[in-house]
Amino acid sequence: MDTSVISSKYQVVIPRKIREKFNIKPGQRVLFIPYQKSLRLVIVPSIDEAYGMLTGMNTENLREEVDEERC
């Protein structure tokens, strides 16, 4: 298990092995998600990487469409 220490400026270094495994580059965005008693770090994909991620998603019950029908 790889660990890191929080600096006095609340910065954390991502260990090399993890950076290489997930191809994390400088300037890349990450998202922190608190979950129960843990903190999850999620890599935010670039627009190019995210393109097509939702292909095939079921859009039958979108709330906006339901709200429009009530008006």
Image (tube, rainbow, N blue to C red):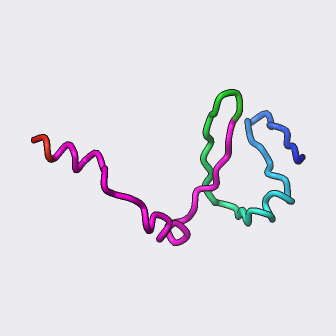
Is 28 located above or below residue 63 in the figure? Answer: below
Is 64 located above or below residue 25 in the figure? Answer: above
Is 25 located above or below residue 7 in the figure? Answer: below
Name, please, the residue furthest toward the left: 71
Identity of the residue drawn at 20% across and 43% down: 67
Q: Which residues are magenta?
A: 39-68
- The picture quadrant where one finds residue 40 is top right
- The picture quadrant where one finds residue 4 is top right
Residue 36 on the magenta span: no
Tell how many labels.
0
Residue 46 on the magenta span: yes
Where is residue 31? Give x, y as percent. Answer: 60, 47
Identity of the residue drawn at 80% across and 48% down: 13
Name, please, the residue furthest toward the right: 1
Assign the C terminus to one quadrant of the image.
top left
Where is residue 29? Give x, y as percent. Answer: 61, 55
Out of 58 and 46, give the one closest to the viewer.
58
Where is residue 10? Give x, y as percent. Answer: 73, 36
Please indicate whether residue 61 sits to the left or right of residue 47 in the image.
left
Where is residue 24? Give x, y as percent. Answer: 72, 62
Identity of the residue drawn at 79% across and 63% down: 21
Out of 63 and 37, give the one closest to the viewer.
63
Please indicate whether residue 12 sits to the left or right of residue 58 in the image.
right
